[in-house]
Image: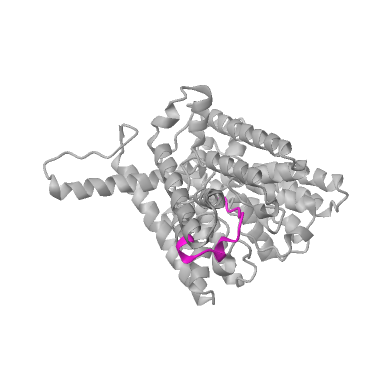
């Protein structure tokens, strides 16, 4: 492990984070709020980053270890320094770190009580952390810093979600820039639509930040239900759906053949899951909750998309719905959006590959002489990629089970323990019971919050990037 290289790059990352914090500082200045929380955070981030980058030298040669260490450690540092404004606003350190990690990992779980009592600048920063984490703080770092080269490739592979790290351009920095350009374009379009619909600039920007990032934070305690507007809910539903699509596909749709997106098997599977989820949930709401057809489709569309894409907004208190409705939403918590999207979860491509592989295994006893090759988009899937998918799902479910058990031992009821675990591991946000859409995670014991912070961190970085740090081989000298 080249510790000097890791610390040098982390220093640059902290410096960049400090510069970004000038944005909420200006928001505080505009609204006449205290500049102290962000001024201290800016000084701490820039000073710490400068000391690290100056005192430690970056080595020319990089390996996978350095990439994993920088990505995993970089997200921890970002959450730690990003929590400073929360701490200086009167929030306890563990709650501040929880909120900051929930922001950067686009989880959306919150420990804040009486959200609307906090300053507008702090709530703006809270939403902005999700926008930064949606496409990835490391990916932004790669796009901005011109000299990373091979180092950028190692960090790109460690951070970008999905089993196949598909790029747009041969050079990783160019890919990172183009992905962020598509992300920025979606954000600008959504802000403009919100303004046309009558939202203030503040509400338009903060809700755009947390929609295109599939984050789910809102400066209102009632989340999207505060607007009580089918048009706003419809706009958010559309953009959640778009944010759940592979951003490489977005780029190719904008600058290549329009039909490419329809040929993509993962997108078609994603579309099918979304459609079936909406139909099933709408039917149950119409049958059991006596909603009209329009309201059934309205709530089913919004809540299905917000869970599938791990956004976590709430247009209604779905914890008050029938058990059948809640079971559908619980099942959707284990899905996720497409690879290389801003959505969390297991990801559609992994589920699709497992279903294809299961079908092949089922055909084996019936057609023993047939040659069955696992293919995705017409290409044979390498065995090592399938093994990686299986290992990921096994580890994902293992972490879910262990964290659920620990939360239950800490006193949470079984529904709250299970949904708190999957809501944080899948970066979804709200769960059911004590952590329902109109509740929060404040009552969870400190040890439980630490477990859930780990879940958010590991879930956003897709397990391997974090768990590899726990292996003895990772820390051995070459």
Depicted 218 relative to depicted 377: above or below: below
As displayed, is residue 121 above or below residue 453? Answer: above
The residue sitting at 52% across, 35% down in the picture is: 247
Does 37 lie within the magenta span?
no
Residue 191 position in % (x across, y down):
69, 37
Q: Is residue 261 visible?
A: yes
Residue most extreme to the left: 369
* Along the viewing direction, whichever of 22 and 190 lies nearer the viewer: 190
Residue at figure coordinates x 56%, y 65% from the top left? 320
Q: Position of residue 145 (x, y in %)?
A: 63, 33
Kindly report the secondary structure that dominates the magenta region of the rendered protein.
Answer: loop
Part of the protein shown in magenta: 311-325
Color theme of the render: one colour
The reply to whether the magenta stretch includes residue 313 is: yes
Task: Return the x and y of residue 204 as percentages of the image width and height.
Answer: 71, 42
Q: In this view, does 116 lie above or below 386?
A: below
| In the depicted structure, whether residue 189 falls above or below residue 225 | above
Foreground residue among 187 and 396 = 187
Residue 477 visible to an observer of this rendering = no
Image coords of residue 94 (percent x, y): 66, 65
Residue 256 relative to residue 360: left or right: right
- Left or right of 120 in this view: 209: left
Give the tally of numbered discs: 0
**Residue found at x 74% / y 63%:** 114
In this view, which residue lies farthest toward the right? 32
Q: Nearer the viewer, residue 154 or 123?
A: 123
Q: In which quarter of the image is residue 192?
A: top right
């Amino acid at each position: 492990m080249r510790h000097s290289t890791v610390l040098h790059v982390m220093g640059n990352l902290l410096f960049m984070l400090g510069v970004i914090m000038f944005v909420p500082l200006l928001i505080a200045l505009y609204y006449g709020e205290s500049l102290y929380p962000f001024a201290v955070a800016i000084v701490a981030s820039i000073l710490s980053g400068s000391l690290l980058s100056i005192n430690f030298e970056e080595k020319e040669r990089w390996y996978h270890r350095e990439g994993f260490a920088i990505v995993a450690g970089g997200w921890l540092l970002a959450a730690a320094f990003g929590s400073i404004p929360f701490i200086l606003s009167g929030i306890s350190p563990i709650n501040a770190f929880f909120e900051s990690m929930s922001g950067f990992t686009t989880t959306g779980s919150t420990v804040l009580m009486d959200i609307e009592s906090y300053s507008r600048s702090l709530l703006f920063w809270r939403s902005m952390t999700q926008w930064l984490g949606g496409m990835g703080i490391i990916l932004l770092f790669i796009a901005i810093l011109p000299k990373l080269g091979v180092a950028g490739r190692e960090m790109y592979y460690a951070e970008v979600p999905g089993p196949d790290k598909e790029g747009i351009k041969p050079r990783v920095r160019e890919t990172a820039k183009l992905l962020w350009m598509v992300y920025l374009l979606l954000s600008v379009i959504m802000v403009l639509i919100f303004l046309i619909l009558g939202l203030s600039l503040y509400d338009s920007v903060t809700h755009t930040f947390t929609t295109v990032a599939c984050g789910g934070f809102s400066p209102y305690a009632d989340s999207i239900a505060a607007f009580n507007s089918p048009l706003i809910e419809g706009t958010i539903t559309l953009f959640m759906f778009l944010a759940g699509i592979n951003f490489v596909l977005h780029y190719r749709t904008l600058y290549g053949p329009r039909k490419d997106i329809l040929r993509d098997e993962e997108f078609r599977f994603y579309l099918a899951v979304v459609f079936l989820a909406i139909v099933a949930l709408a039917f149950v709401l119409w049958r059991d909750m006596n909603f009209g057809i329009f309201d059934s489709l309205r709530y089913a569309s919004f809540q299905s998309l917000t869970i599938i894409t791990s956004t976590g907004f709430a247009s209604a208190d779905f914890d008050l719905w029938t058990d059948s409705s809640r079971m559908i939403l619980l099942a959707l918590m284990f899905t996720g959006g497409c690879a290389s999207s801003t959505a969390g979860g297991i990801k559609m491509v992994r589920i699709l590959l497992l279903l294809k592989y299961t079908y092949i295994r089922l055909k084996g006893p019936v057609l023993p002489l047939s040659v069955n090759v696992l293919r995705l988009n017409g290409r044979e899937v390498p065995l090592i990629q399938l093994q990686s998918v299986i290992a990921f799902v096994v580890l994902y479910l293992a972490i879910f089970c262990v964290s659920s058990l620990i939360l239950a031992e800490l006193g949470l009821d079984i529904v709250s323990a299970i949904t708190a675990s999957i809501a944080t591991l899948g970066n979804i946000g709200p769960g059911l019971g004590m952590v329902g859409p109109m509740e929060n995670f404040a009552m969870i014991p400190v040890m439980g919050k630490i477990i859930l912070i780990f879940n958010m961190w590991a879930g956003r970085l897709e397990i391997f990037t974090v768990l590899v740090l726990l292996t003895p081989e990772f820390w051995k000298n070459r």
